[in-house]
Image: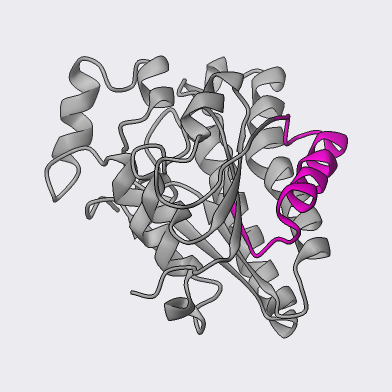
Amino acid sequence: MRKSGDRNWRIQGHRSCHRQRDGASWGKGGRELCFRSSWRGKDSCRDQGSGGQAVAVKADVSKSSDVQELFEQTIRTFGRLDILVNNAGVYRFEPIEAVTEEEFHRIYNTNVLGALLTMQEAIKRFGPDGGTIINIATAGISTTAPMSSVYTSSKSALVTLSHVLAKELGPRNIRVNVVAPGATETEGAHAIGVLEGPMVKQLVDGTPLGRLGQPEDIVGPVVFLASSDAHWVTGEVLFASGGSR
């Protein structure tokens, strides 16, 4: 597969970007700006010997002023922007009766508004040849698991937004696609306890390939969609879920 060459990525995400364990695939021959909403992510954004360059920036994607500064930092550091990966996301699993107005806005402000704000800024800075946007959703948009009403609906909104923008931005040679991971072993998943106890068995049993996903399982699909091999692909949802649908 032809990778992304020397194009500049902007990858932003909550806690652990899916690329954390396979940074070489992202940075090979190119440069990156990696955003973390948790400053603990700073060290894991370092170059990992792939010949690329990574920079960590702390910000809140639900605030337009922070998002503008993130993209200004991208241009100051690398001179241009070619690829945006929207990996920021927050979640909570609870029955509908327990959902509060505060929690609803917390999830939607990051998962939907944050993605919209970053895409607005990205399209301003893509060059005359266009650009690529990859939004990270969840296989839950298909599995629709109980107690995930707010999180799953926020990611469904992100998918719909991506479909609309694929058509709206296509004439400007800007491709917009979605990767929908299944249950993946990340720092965030461990932090909220969804990978403990009987939940793990339930997730694995619901995955035809018989295991939890790993961050590197998500890297390949994202790199493909960003590469020239996918130049005729836009408005698509690529499930990276071990068959879980």
Horizontal side, residue 183 vs residue 127: left or right = left
Q: Which residues are magenta?
A: 58-85
Q: Position of residue 27 (x, y in %)?
A: 47, 53
Instruction: Determine which quarter of the picture holds residue 21.
Output: top left
Compared with 68, 41 (above or below) is above
Q: Position of residue 57 (x, y in %)?
A: 68, 32
Name the image colouring.
one colour
Horizontal side, residue 224 vs residue 62: left or right = left
Q: Residue furthest right?
A: 65
Q: Position of residue 113 (x, y in %)?
A: 74, 42
Which residue shows up at 71% across the image and 80% down it?
A: 129
Horizontal side, residue 97 vs residue 223: left or right = right
Does residue 192 appear in the picture of this structure?
no
How many marks are shown on the rendered structure?
0
Q: Nearer the viewer, residue 55 or 61?
A: 55
- Quadrant where the N terminus is found in the figure: bottom left
Which residue shows up at 54% across the image and 19% down it?
A: 40
Compared with 129, 46 (above or below) is above
Instruction: Determine which quarter of the picture holds residue 185.
Output: top left
Which residue shows up at 66% across the image and 59% down it?
A: 161
Q: Position of residue 109 (x, y in %)?
A: 72, 34
Q: Nearer the viewer, residue 122 or 195?
A: 122
60 within the magenta span: yes
Which residue shows up at 15% across the image and 39% down it?
A: 211
Instruction: Determine which quarter of the picture holds residue 191.
Output: top left
Q: Nearer the viewer, residue 60 or 52?
A: 52
